[in-house]
Structures are given as C-alpha cells and as structure tokens.
Amino acid sequence: MNLNDHILLWNHVFMKILDVRKNALEPGEKLSHYQLPASAYLYMIDGTARVRMDQHCYIIDGFHVVHGGKLADLEIETDSGVAYYMILYKAILPLPCRMEIQQLMEYERPFQNQFGMIPANPLDMYQCIEALYWEWEQPTKLAKLHAKVLFQQWVYSLLEDLHNQSIQPFKPDLVTRAVEYMNTHMQEPLGLDKMGEELDCSVGHLSRLFKQKLNVSPIQYLAQRRVERAAYLMTHTDATLQLIAEQVGYPDAHSLSRSFKKIEGLSPVQYKKKQRMNGAKQEIPFQKKHDLPHLMQENALQPLYSHLYNDIDYQYQKNVGGELFMQGKFKMTALSMLLCFTLLLAACSSPAPSASNAQPETATPTAQSSNQTTTDGKSATSVETRTVSTLRGDVVIPANPQRVASDQYMGYLLKLGIIPVGVRTFMLNESWIEKSGISEDIIAGIEDLGGEFPMNLEKLVSLEPDLIIGSIDKNIEDYEKIATTVFLPYWEGETTSGPLEKLRRIASVFGKEKEAEQWITTYQAEVEEAKKQIDGIIKEGETVSIVQVGNKALYVMAAEGGNYGSSTIYDMLKLPPTQQALDMKEGFENISLEVLPEYMGDHVFIYGSQDEGANEVLNSEVWKHLPAVQKGQVYAYGSFGDKGDEFVMEDPFSLELQLDTIKNLLLNAKK
C-alpha cells in the first residue's frame, strides 16, 4: 500500500500499547527465532548487529528502527554487543467506520508490514522512547496515559521519516505466515477462528487467499500437513499411533486413522506395512518455521489430495460427540491473557472459583450456604452452594445453577430437565432432536458456542454461565477462568464409560439422582420387554459381532467401552460377543480386511453400510464368504450422513431410539 493510505489508517485506528521493553545482548550472544507476539518496533540504540525479520536482513550499526508484524520470526546476532528498545502494540479499528477504511485494514494489513530505516533525528527519537519506557514502567494510570501520548509522538516522527526517505515497507505473505504458524503449532487445536485471531485477519479473507493460492481451504491444508508428518513418524520411528496422533495435533489414534485414510487412501497400518515392504525412506515433509523458503513459492508446497478429503470431520470413533481433528490442548499465551483479562473481569458475574478439574465418579453433594455482608452491614441474600466430592478434589458449585454451558451431554441435560444456555454446534444438530418431542423454541434458545474444543471462549464469557461442564481435560483450565467448571470425561483412554453411568454422574452434579433413576428404571423395563421379543433369534452358543465399514474404515467394536450401538447390543440386550470382542483392551479395534473373518461371529451388525467406501468391504470376496453373510445373519443399520444418527451419541434420547432400531432389525429378520 502507499504511504498515504498507511497514514490514513493511523488517523483512524485506536492504538493499544502492550509492552515496552529495554534489552541488551552481550558480545557473541544471539536471540534466536523469537516470534513476535504482536506488531513491534525495535529501536537499536547502541552497538552493531545483524537483525533478521523473517527472511529480511538488516545490518545495524548504531541507531536503527526495524518494524515487524505479529508472528514475524526475529533473530538478532551481535559480535560487539547491542542495546535496543522494543515496543509491542496492537492497532484496533473502531466500528462503525467508512467501508473503504475497513477494506484498507482488511486487505492491506499495514501494521504487519516490515521495514528498516535509519532515523533522520535519532537523538530526538531516543529521548522520546526513553521517556516512553520510563512512563510505561510507572504504576499510575496517568503515567500510562502519558506513555500513549509519547507513542503517538514516536509514530509521528517515524511516519515523517518514512515519507521523506520514500521507504516502501515489505508486505509479508499471509498464506506463508499461516503455513508457518500451522507448522509451529501443529500439536494444538487449530481452528479457523484461532488462526484468524493469531494472524490478525478475518476468517473469510484467510480462506479466500488459501483458495486463490493453493486451491484448498486452510483446514484441508492443515490436515494434509498433519498426515504427512504422521506418515514420516510412522516410517522413521517405532512410536505408537497414539503418540504420533498427539504429536501432530489429533486427540487420539482413531481420529488420526480416519483423517489419514481420507487423505492417503489407506490406513496407517497399511501405509506403514507398504513403506517397510518397499524399503522406502520418506523425506521429511515437515519444515520448521525458520526453514521455510523465502516468499514460499506455490511449488514448494506439496500437492494436496483434496479428492480424498472429507470436510465432515467430526465423525471419529472415539470422538462421538463431534470433536474436530484439531482438538488438543488449548494454550493461551501470556500476551493473549493480558489482552482479555480486563474483559473477563468485567464480563463474569462473580470471581472465577478455585475449583480444580473434577471427575464426579464418586460425587457426594452436600448443601451449604454463603452469607455475604454489604457495605452498610446488612446481610445480603445467601447464595446456596453444593460441594461435589470427586477423585480430583472438591468443587463448590451453585446448588441450583441456572445458566449451564456444556461442550457435551446436551441430551443428558435435557432428559434431566436442564436446558443449557450454550453448547457446541454439533450438539444442536444431533439427529435424535427431531424425534425427541422437544420444542423447536427450546433448541433455538440454546446458544451455539462453535464446533471446536474448547467452546468459543468469547461467546462463553458473554453468556455469563454459573456452571460449565467440560468433557476434555485439556480445556478445563480455560473454562475455569470464566466460571465454576466440572470435568466429566466422555471418553477415558480409548474407551467410553457406560451411558447409564454417564447419566448418573451428571445427575449427581445437579442433585437429580431421583430423576435419573426413574428414567433408568423405565428404560430397563423396556429393555427387558425387547429381550423377550427377540428371544431365540440368537440361538444358544451363537455369537454377535459389530463392525463399522463406512468412510473407508473397518472397525470392530469391543464387548465393553465401544460405541455405535455396542452398549445397546452388548450391555443392554446382552447379545453374546465373540471372544475377540471380549479380549479387546480398548473400545474398538482397527483391522484390515484380510483378518476380518477372525473377528466375525455367527451374527453380524454392520454400521455404515450405505456410507462412502463401504462397498470396498461389502463387495469383497472376504466379506461374501463370511458364514454370517452366507446364512443371511447380517443386520445393516445406521449411517453417518449429514447429521449422523441416533447411534453417534449415547444420551437417553439416543438410547431409546437405538433400542427400537436394534429390536426391529432382529424381529424383521425373524419374519
């Protein structure tokens, strides 16, 4: 952009100083690969050095100004020693403003630009930044205001020099910066919102640039990079698939396996065997951020196999609640915390409690009250609380929480008469809702808190919840900064606890044990009636297997801890599993087609037979020669589809539908 437009934006933005630092490097010392947490000015005031900002180098000798944007990679090397100031700042465009100003900010992003220059009046700028640093170090609000004034003076002098010296800043490539960010944060849950925030650009703008340059979305590109890194680790190390999954940003081995097959066309096990048989040594596909080529050319990016990629990525064996593959530990930097701390304090209705992560397996609530005294000495309304005793400590929660947010368990909560104020997107689209009889107005009144883990923290703050239910351990600390949080793990390792046990756990948190037991009693009576109706279809001595074949996957469910209806088939209806299913240590096992016969019982329930890729199994000779297939003792049910079905979740509404489906499958086969 031209300098006049840059100056125009400086006249419209609100500038927030984040930090002012004074640093020095000793002779021979080096600052290596420091990623700028915000837009920054460096003012070198003494010594000589070589400064590299991304791929641009500046030779410093005495006074020199260098500017870089957020996430720029900074290196400083010095033989003689160097001293410098650093100003970290953020430019915020207040709304509303003219459309052309918004477009300039969106597309030009001048505060991300890089440049270096020798100031015309170095001592004047030195005195200004010295005073700015001194005021910034003072604790008073008046000093902070003066620091802001001095910063404006500093910027004015700088823009005047840029104009007079006709210096054109270098505009970094946003796609290259995004790719670098993905490579360095691959282990973290990277959603579009998160990347847009870190890169100081809108999600729409980032997606458009990726489509223009690489012909794929940012999420598709990230999935490809993760799979490439996983492929390298599988080929060159003996690490388990679970360890590799965590290393490349997946919550578990199954999630990685599903994504791997979508992109590579074969499972990780098949890929590893193929690589070892060929004796191939794959080149390292993962480049560290500082190894990326200057102004990364498109041909430096390996091709993406988008035709194998499926955007519906919530359908993981382990993540039955819809976890996206970019889950993982959500890390907030100190700078991010500094920016949002004031907002959190203002938004929260009460101080965040000190409750630790809780796993209410042995929850024993006890009622208590807290009396508060006002400034005039009168007693305020007492606040009723309950203490939930858990394996991870006691959590003090409201006795009757009115504003509950949850990243899982919506069906459980609704069955107990609790209407959450906010849940993840996936919860609001569950297939059982249409058949549940719940009013559309009730569902419409539940806030959508985004499709990822953790829930959208900004929206979560605005809802002012008095209790948050979190299902993933890595997200609990983020939730606890907002409101009282109870940790209820949906999955434990590779296995899910029983759905009735889940209901009891949730009920114990809310004091709804009676309601939970009433539903369980009714449901178990329906199960007993169903068992009578299907009696004799599975003959004595015969066994039952459950397989999932859709989406180019082949999984066998375990006798305990599986999903996709396995709890209904094995635990509720007590249909006899095979010995292989009994021996499985986890809730499922990913197998190859060649060994399928070893896992199959006399009767086979097959989930996903209508889904993409299922025909590869169903049309194979291995499948056709299975005894259960030849005897017609195969029961096809379920499909992921757009929303999945009642077998994706295990809440009470889903269990009721599952029971009817499985019962009717067997009764129809009997006819």
Image (tube, rainbow, N blue to C red):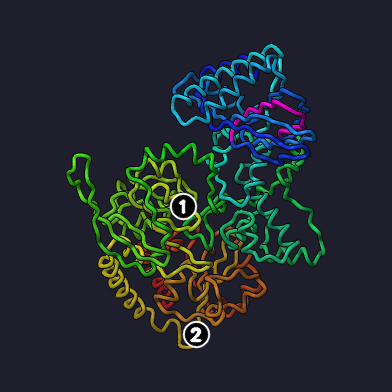
* Image x and y of residue 93, in percent: 50, 25
Q: Main secondary structure of the magenta part?
A: strand
Judge left or right: residue 2 versus residue 284.
left
Residue labelled with disc 1: 477
Q: Residue at the spot x=41%, y=77% of the render?
A: 671
Q: CA distance from mark 1 to mark 2?
A: 49 Å
Residue most toward the top? Answer: 164
Asked which quadrant contains residue 156, the reply is top right
Name which of mark 1 and mark 2 comes first in the sequence.
Answer: 1
Q: Disc 1 on helix, strand or loop? A: helix
Residue 30 visible in the displayed image: yes
The numbered dot on residue 105 is none
Asked if labels 2 and 1 touch by Cβ distance under 8 angstroms, the answer is no
Vertical comparison of 666 with 310: above or below: below
Q: Nearer the viewer, mark 1 or mark 2?
A: 1
Residue segment shown in magenta: 38-53
- Of the residues shown, which amino acid type is indicated by label 2? Glu
Asked which quadrant contains residue 80, the reply is top right
* Image x and y of residue 181, in percent: 64, 42
Q: Residue at the spot x=52%, y=57% of the render?
A: 315
Q: How many marks?
A: 2
Judge left or right: residue 112 versus residue 470.
right
- Of the residues shown, which amino acid type is indicated by label 1? Glu
Which residue is nearer to you in this view: 199 or 411? 199
Which residue is nearer to you in this view: 30 or 36? 30
Residue labelled with disc 2: 542
Q: Disc 2 on helix, strand or loop? A: loop
